């Protein structure tokens, strides 16, 4: 009936202790006074400053770039950001958000919208718009005007579209280009 008894020193709680701080820094481990503390410091896979090579590791860390530096100008941030717009559909109880930068043309966008909402959108023609289609894609531009998707070149559309709405074809008669 021998029960296993553990001493606090046998458990090596220091190696599994959670600490706050930057990765690789060990504020509590200083120069070890005895060989047992040296072993505990090496078990934690952290080198002491006395163990580091003379300047070799310092060169590589000084060359490492700090995250977020150099500062990125706001216009560059805007270019890198995704241009998400809300998409609604007449008769659907939910909205979706899509990134317009994922698509290269109106045809790719319309195929994605058809798959997303399980509807049929007709083909756009400059002369008749989406004449005869059950659903018509429209968008609100920066000025707040609602226009047919396809009326303006693709690049202009991406820059001016605030939100998309897939309307019933019968309600979109007044938006057709003439």
Image (tube, rainbow, N blue to C red):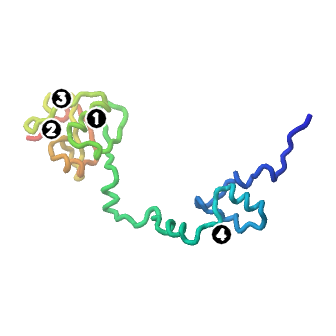
Place residue 4 in its image quadrant: top right
Residue 113, percent from left and from top? 28, 34
Label 2 crowd bin: few (<14), some (14–19), many (20+), radius 10 Å: few
**Residue 68: where, in percent of width, then height?**
44, 63
Q: Quadrant of residue 50?
A: bottom right
Q: Give residue 52's position: percent from left, percent from top.
A: 61, 67
N-terminal label among 2 and 1: 1
Front-most of residues 23 and 141: 23
Mark 1 nearby-residue class (10 Å; few <14, some 14–19, many ≥20): some
The reply, left or right, for residue 4 in relation to residue 173 is right
Comparing marks 3 and 1, which lies closer to the viewer? 1
- What whole-number distance in Å separates the C-alpha atoms at marks 4 and 1? 60 Å
Judge depth for marks 2 and 4 and give the one in front: 4
For disc 3, the marked residue is 133
Q: Which mark is residue 112?
A: 1
Q: Is residue 93 above or below residue 178?
A: above
Q: Nearer the viewer, mark 4 or mark 1?
A: 4
């Amino acid at each position: 009936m021998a029960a296993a008894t553990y001493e606090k020193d046998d458990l090596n709680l220091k190696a599994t202790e959670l600490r706050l701080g930057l990765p690789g820094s060990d504020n509590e481990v200083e120069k070890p006074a005895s060989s047992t503390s040296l072993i505990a410091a090496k078990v934690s896979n952290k080198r002491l400053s006395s163990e580091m090579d003379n300047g070799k590791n310092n060169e590589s860390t000084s060359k490492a770039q700090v995250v977020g530096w150099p500062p990125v100008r706001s216009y560059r941030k805007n270019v890198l950001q995704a241009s998400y717009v809300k998409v609604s559909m007449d008769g659907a109880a939910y909205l979706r958000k899509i990134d317009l930068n994922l698509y290269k043309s109106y045809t790719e966008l319309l195929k994605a919208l058809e798959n997303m909402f399980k509807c049929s959108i007709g083909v756009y023609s400059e002369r008749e718009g989406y004449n005869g289609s059950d659903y018509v894609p429209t968008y609100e531009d920066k000025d707040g005007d609602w226009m047919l998707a396809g009326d303006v070149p693709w690049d202009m559309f991406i820059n001016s579209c605030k939100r998309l709405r897939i309307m019933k074809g019968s309600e979109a008669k007044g938006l057709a280009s003439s």
